[in-house]
């Protein structure tokens, strides 16, 4: 971390592992729409706190999560035994106007019964929705919440390009931390640009909270050629352990969130994070070899230069769409790909292509973009 962060850390006496309460275990068929298994969640919370974990992360828009957090954590432990983070989402799917956006805080406090949030985030900032946080006066709102003691620290989570992140951090120095998607698969990815976003946060002296260190579970079960590289290096270590330790080994990372869905995942994460050891130089080489092997799997070789989007008559986010399609091609996870497609593609899906061909003329990689968009639409829509 930066010197200023080390002098006044935002978390103290805390594992570098955070418990992401987004993918909790569910009853019934186990889908996200089934009731959360609160009893199993209680056992996971107990194991986490017993091992020294203190940081819990939920959000207004995580279905049932805030209520489950109250039952499993807030009703059962003293308030000073944990840090709790939640988030305010201004996107259209979460609220319809400024009043509804600002009401999310009170709803989250009622759901959790925690009294205050240690960390409160403006949720999922990107080019598409950034104006809403400005239009609704939400930066001023969270500053006021902090002044009144309802939240202790304010920041935001981010899903976009490093240039936009730099602009936000320049305009809003009051942000005390930033939450970024970081994992070894996305570290050099031309669309997500984890490394450049991380470096931007470091430039501004902001500690980083990592989300998606296992890329929504995809790196817990990577393609066989990747799994073999990791297992040959350390047969006793899970693929997920490599991914989480990679993120946690970054100097300016404060917390690495893991969205654990059962007791076995909790036990695995605690096995290597209770007494965390950063990746050695040789282990970093193993992870780099795994990343390179991932790139050699079936994928759309888009570099996200965005030359294709400048003249697109329907303003399609072609590189982002291809990045989601690669989730399916590289990992074979159709459910995750369809879920990501719902928000990363924005308002213009691949099927909206009018086959004008300007994108293919502009593409320096000479990709058959029209054919690939049709393939994506046929697969994900």
Image: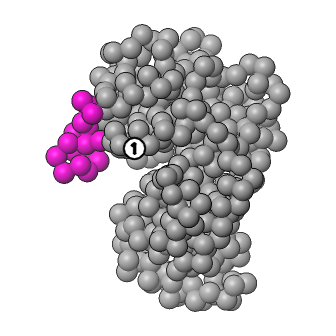
**What residue is shown at x 43% (from left), y 28% (from top)?**
48
| Nearest to the observer: residue 238 or residue 25 | 238
Q: Nearer the viewer, residue 310 or 253?
A: 253
Q: From the top left corner, tell me how far across and down residue 337 is, in percent.
A: 42, 65
Question: Where does label 1 land, which residue?
Answer: 265
> Magenta residues?
25-40
Q: Any magenta on residue 32?
A: yes
Which x, y percent locates residue 322?
54, 73
Q: Residue at x 44, y 83 (%)?
A: 375
Residue at 51 percent of width and 23 percent of height: 52
Q: Is residue 195 visible?
A: yes
Q: How many marks?
A: 1
In-front residue for pair 11/352: 11
Q: Is residue 235 depicted above or below 300 in this figure? A: above
**SS class of the residue under badge 1?**
helix
Location of the N terminus by quadrant is top right
Position of the C terminus by quadrant: bottom left
* Residue 102, visible in the rendered structure: no
Prevalent SS, magenta region = loop
Report the residue at 67% width, 89% height from top. 366
Q: Nearer the viewer, residue 134 or 291?
A: 291
Horizontal arrangement in the rendering, residue 264 relative to residue 323 (left or right): left
Furthest toward the left, the residue is: 28
């Amino acid at each position: 971390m930066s010197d200023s962060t080390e002098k006044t850390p935002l978390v103290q006496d805390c594992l570098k592992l955070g418990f992401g309460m987004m993918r909790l275990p569910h009853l019934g068929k186990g889908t996200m729409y089934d009731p959360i298994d609160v009893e199993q969640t209680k056992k996971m919370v107990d194991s986490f706190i017993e091992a020294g974990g203190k940081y819990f992360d939920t959000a207004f828009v995580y279905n049932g999560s805030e209520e489950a957090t109250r039952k499993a954590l807030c009703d059962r432990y003293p308030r000073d035994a944990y840090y709790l983070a939640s988030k305010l989402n201004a996107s259209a799917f979460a609220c319809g106007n400024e009043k509804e956006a600002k009401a999310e805080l009170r709803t989250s406090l009622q759901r959790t019964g925690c009294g205050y949030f240690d960390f409160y985030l403006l949720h999922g900032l990107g080019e598409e929705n950034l104006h809403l946080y400005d239009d609704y006066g939400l930066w001023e709102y969270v500053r006021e919440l902090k002044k009144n003691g309802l939240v202790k620290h304010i920041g935001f989570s981010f899903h976009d390009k490093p240039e936009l992140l730099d602009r936000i951090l320049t305009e809003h120095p009051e942000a005390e931390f930033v939450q970024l998607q970081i994992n070894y698969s996305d570290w050099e990815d031309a669309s997500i640009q984890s490394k450049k976003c991380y470096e931007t946060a470091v430039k501004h002296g902001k500690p980083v909270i990592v989300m998606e260190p296992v890329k929504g579970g995809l790196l817990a079960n990577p393609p066989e050629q990747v799994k073999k590289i990791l297992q040959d290096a350390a047969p006793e270590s899970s693929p997920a352990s490599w991914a989480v330790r990679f993120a946690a080994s970054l100097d300016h990372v404060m917390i690495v969130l893991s969205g654990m869905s059962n007791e076995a995942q909790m036990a695995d994460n605690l096995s290597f994070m209770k007494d965390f050891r950063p990746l050695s130089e040789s282990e970093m080489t193993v992870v780099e070899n795994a990343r390179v092997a991932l790139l050699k799997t079936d994928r759309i070789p888009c570099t996200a230069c965005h030359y294709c989007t400048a003249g697109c008559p329907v303003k399609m986010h072609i590189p982002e769409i291809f990045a989601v399609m690669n989730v399916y091609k590289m990992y074979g996870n159709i459910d995750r790909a369809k879920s990501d497609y719902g928000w990363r593609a924005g308002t213009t899906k691949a099927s909206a292509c009018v086959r004008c061909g300007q994108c293919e003329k502009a593409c320096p990689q000479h990709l058959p973009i029209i054919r690939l968009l049709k393939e994506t639409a046929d697969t994900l829509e």
